[in-house]
Amino acid sequence: MVVLSGARCEEYNRSVGGVEDSAHLPHAITGQCRAVDILVRSSSARFTLINLGLKLGITRFGLATTFLHMDVAWDLPGHVMFNY
């Protein structure tokens, strides 16, 4: 598994086009990063990661051609799957 992005500082988040309330940024209260982007090389790998994420309680998934975003940002709308 190749992690493309995890915790980010605000400057780096802006440079990669991340949103202001990105789950990749440390949470204001807990200081924890709540997101990860993982390289996916095939649709079957994406499917496997989504299934594992659901079993582990991941509530937010972002689908891109080359990566899968997963996060547990409880302060953002949950149980969603979105496209990049």
Image (cartoon, grey):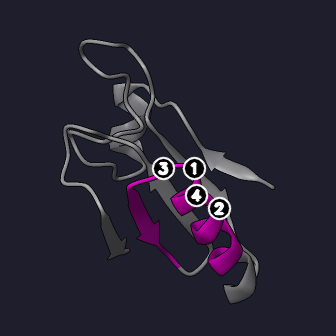
In this picture, which residue range is highlighted in magenta?
46-64
In this view of the protein, which residue sits in the foreground, 25 or 79?
Answer: 79
Which residue type carries mark 4? Answer: Lys
Proximity of marks 2 and 3: CB atoms separated by less than 8 Å: no
Q: CA distance from mark 1 to mark 3?
A: 4 Å
| Residue where numbered disc 4 is placed | 55
Question: What amino acid does circle 2 point to?
Answer: Leu
Distance CA(mark 4)–CA(mark 3): 6 Å
The span from disc 1 to disc 2 (Cα, nearest Å) is 6 Å
Give the crowd class for mark 3: few <14, some 14-19, many >=20 residues within 10 Å.
few
Q: What is the crowding at mark 2: few (fewer than 14 residues within 10 Å), some, or many (at least 20)? A: few
Q: Which residue appears at 43% of the width and 20% of the height?
A: 32
Q: Which residue is mark 3?
A: 57
Mark 3 is on which residue type? Gly
Q: Which residue matches tag 1?
A: 56
Q: Which residue is mark 2?
A: 52
Name the image quarter holding the N terminus.
bottom right
Q: Are marks 4 and 3 in contact (CB under 8 Å)?
A: yes
Residue lying furthest bottom? 43
Q: Earlier in the sequence, mark 2 or mark 3?
A: 2
- Locate residue 65, reporting x and y percent: 56, 81
Q: Disc 2, disc 4: CB below 8 Å?
A: yes
Do the residues bearing badges 1 and 3 touch, measured as CB atoms within 8 Å? yes
Where residue 14 sits: x, y (%)? 32, 41
Give residue 22's position: percent from left, percent from top.
30, 42
Could you classify mark 4 by the number of other residues whose Cα lies within 10 Å: few (under 14), some (14-19), or many (20 or more)?
A: few
Secondary structure of the residue carrying numbered label 3: loop
Mark 2 falls on what kind of element?
Answer: helix
Q: Secondary structure at mark 4?
A: helix
Mark 1 lies on a secondary structure that is loop
- CB within 8 Å, label 4 to label 1: yes
On screen, residue 46 above or below 62: below
